[in-house]
Image: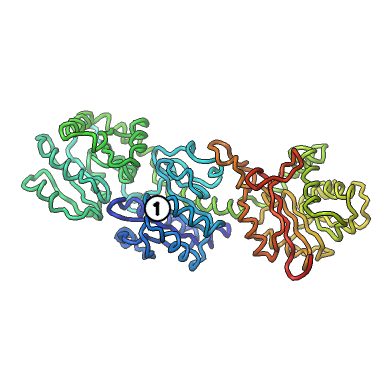
Amino acid sequence: MTESGRNARVAIFCDCLPSTGIGHAVRCLALGRELAARGALVRHVLAEGSATEPHRIAGVVPDLLAAAPDSPALAGALDDFLRRTEADLLVVDSYLATPSFYADLAAARPTLPVLAFDDQGEKAGLPLLGVLATGLAAVPDPFPGRFAPFSAVGPEFFPLSETCRRTLNRAPRRDGRLERLLLVMGGSDPEGQTTRLARLLRTLDNLSEVHVVAGPLFGDTAELRRALADDPHFRLHESPPDFHALAVSCDLALTGAGITLVELLSLGVPIAALILADNQEPAARALEKRELGIVLGRFDRLDDEELLAAARRAMADPERLERSAAKGRALIDGRGAVRLADRVLEILARYRGEAFAADEVVEEYRRASAHPEPYRKALWGSAEGMTNRFLLALEALGPGPLGSWCDVGCGTGDFLLTAESAREVESCTGLDLSPEMIAFASGRDFRTRDRRFLRQSFLEPVPGAPFDLVTCLGVLQKCGLGLKRAVRGLARLVRPGGRVLASTKNLGWRAFDAPGFLPNPGHHWFRPAQIQEAFEEAGLRLEFLRGMDTRTKTFQTLEGSHNLLALGVREGGHA
């Protein structure tokens, strides 16, 4: 397991209120459990006023913020917690947190990776690293391209609760009978549809058993009790600890189209769903489209007669219900939380620049070494682009001799050839892990007499160090080390007052705001703020951070290019 998984400090923030239900807490606890099983250090954080019952049942003690989920003070309160606990990653699950919350948090913590649960594309325009869209209707289409490497999208990632996962699946009925009916609208039911449906169902004379569930945040059940009074066919269950076992004993569930619906699908329970809120409509549409269950309609667009008729139609086709239940169980297979935890840690590794191993990089260059052209050996896009990148790097360094120079990831040695055409080079040490690159560079003619090409890591002792200049072009996006570790290694090679120049891939390119325009998955992509933080933490005073266009050989704004160039001066001396 990478360091990202074993030592990652992950904060998971959610609200758990009667108005939003307990679904946030359920899926956050499921994710947190699997992250902890992989060695992550997980802290659960709740907004002010949230219920702690789901966490208590799961044996988790959450941290409570002194700010409501829609409060202007929420970002500041959460930022204080994140700094105090030195969190590496934040996961947010909230319907009520405002866009200004995300903007304020991004302004306060521009390098903190933030992932948010998303139910219907509502987080697409927010300043996030990515989304966790795990609903039935989840697709990547609404989201900007920059989210793609850092998101988990699809119902295969749905995180089920542990008790749900451990419950044996319902055995399908073969006789076409509906003897036991489950009525559950979720953890809270703020719209009062449990009581409404219970009253309507009492008018039917063909129901043997109806099990009515009031969830943990249902509130006062007095009215519901009155609705069920004196009818032996109806039984009320208040926050039943064995809810999932109860569910699999039933032949049909009338339920809301929230998280409970997906849990019931995983158990193979036939479903007739009532839409209780705007955010449930995509799931309901997907339920119908995938033929996973029956949709009754939206609660506030059906009068009592229409709702009862829809319920009767659903109950009249038990064979269809059984077919749908089988499809639902196949789709929601119970491993969503495992997949989601693995994906979250993969996202963190990719964000840190740790997703590719050094051996993988060496093998890639071994295969490329068979090409006759130097630019293709070094995996540059074109000869012109390679040369222009070197010329822009020299322009950023300014006029004058280069002094003692170490070129990390020197490849074919073409940067030295380009530099010699315009500058005096006192000495040059090229480093590369690829034996093919070192062999090719060593056999070329250079004007610089004091030169050497060494097959070694720049983290090992390098002959001639410390240097006046260390360059690292096109390496950070795939060096197998991680961004901060790599920049620290570069900084150690340069003398006080010396300079480090590096280029890499820019996640801040505005083109990635468009859906479908995706960063190349074969590279790491970094936010400019990450580069700045890595330089400063390594003791490098950042003097230059610009985008660059290698086609036109011009510098660009950071938003205007997918490449960026950074120049830093080692503290403790004079440039």
Q: Tag 1's secondary structure?
A: loop
- Residue 319: quadrant of the picture: top left
- From this viewpoint, which residue is outermost toward the bottom? 572
Q: Is residue 436 visible?
A: no
**In front of the other: 358 or 568:** 568
Query: To which quarter of the image does residue 51 belong?
Result: bottom left
Above or below: residue 290 compared with residue 236: above
Residue drawn 77% across the image and 45% down it: 389
* Quadrant that contains the N terminus: bottom right
- Answer with left or right where residue 236 lies relative to residue 280: left
What percent of the width, then of the height, locates residue 346? 54, 51
Q: Which residue is mark 1?
A: 97
Colour scheme in use: rainbow
Q: Position of residue 259 (x, y in %)?
A: 33, 46
Residue 263 is situated, as x and y percent measured from the top left of the image, at: 33, 45
Residue at 73% in and 54% down: 502
Rendered view: 225 above or below 9: above
Q: Residue at x 73, y 38 (%)?
A: 381
Q: How many marks?
A: 1
Please say whether residue 132 is visible from this viewpoint. Answer: yes
In this view, which residue lies farthest toward the left?
Answer: 230
Mark 1, residues whose alpha carbon is within 10 Å: few (<14), some, or many (≥20)? many
What amino acid is labelled 1 in the image? Answer: Ala
Q: On the rendered image, what quadrant is the C terminus found in?
A: bottom right
Q: Nearer the viewer, residue 209 or 69?
A: 69
Residue 271 pos. (x, y %): 27, 37
Please indicate whether residue 373 sits to the left or right of residue 336 in the image.
Answer: right
Name the residue: 44% across, 59% down: 75
